Amino acid sequence: MKFFEINLLGVYVAPISLLMIAAWIIAVALRRFSAHFGLQRHVWHPALFLLSVYIIVLSSIVLLIAR
């Protein structure tokens, strides 16, 4: 599948930017879930862990849409 620019109120937006926003929203939900249950205290470097979760979510979304 090819990704095409999306016309958003007259501005052409790259599709990866919309996927990044969707991944960020999912990552925020996962971060709140892990903070609620105290899972972040078991992680060595919380910021690096959250970045890794964001990258995993973003790549999963791209792979699912590109299929």
Image (cartoon, helix red, strand yellow):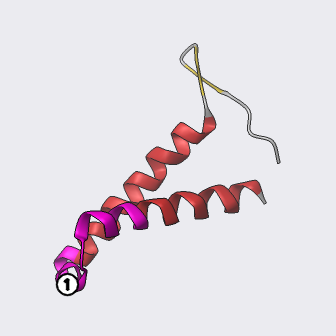
Q: Residue at x 61, y 31 (%)?
A: 14
- Front residue of this view, candidates 54 and 11: 54
Give the x, y percent position of residue 59: 58, 60
Q: Residue furthest front?
A: 44
Q: Which residue is mark 1?
A: 37
Question: 48 or 26: nearer the eye?
Answer: 48
Magenta-tinted stretch:
35-53
Q: Quadrant of the C terminus?
A: bottom right
Say which of 56 and 45 sits in front.
45
Identified at 52% across, 38% down, the residue is 17
Q: Is residue 48 magenta?
A: yes
Magenta segment, prevailing SS (helix, strand or loop): helix
Picture quadrant of residue 30: bottom left
* Up/down of 40 relative to 13, above or below: below
* x and y percentages locating residue 29 in the rendered image: 32, 64
Task: Look at label 1 and name its amino acid.
Answer: Phe
Helix, strand or loop at mark 1: loop
Question: Residue, x 53% and y 17% (percent of image)?
Answer: 9
Q: For this rendering, which residue is in front, 61 or 50?
A: 50
Residue 12: quadrant of the picture: top right
Image coordinates of residue 4 in percent, x first then y, are 74, 33
Is residue 9 part of the magenta span, yes or no?
no
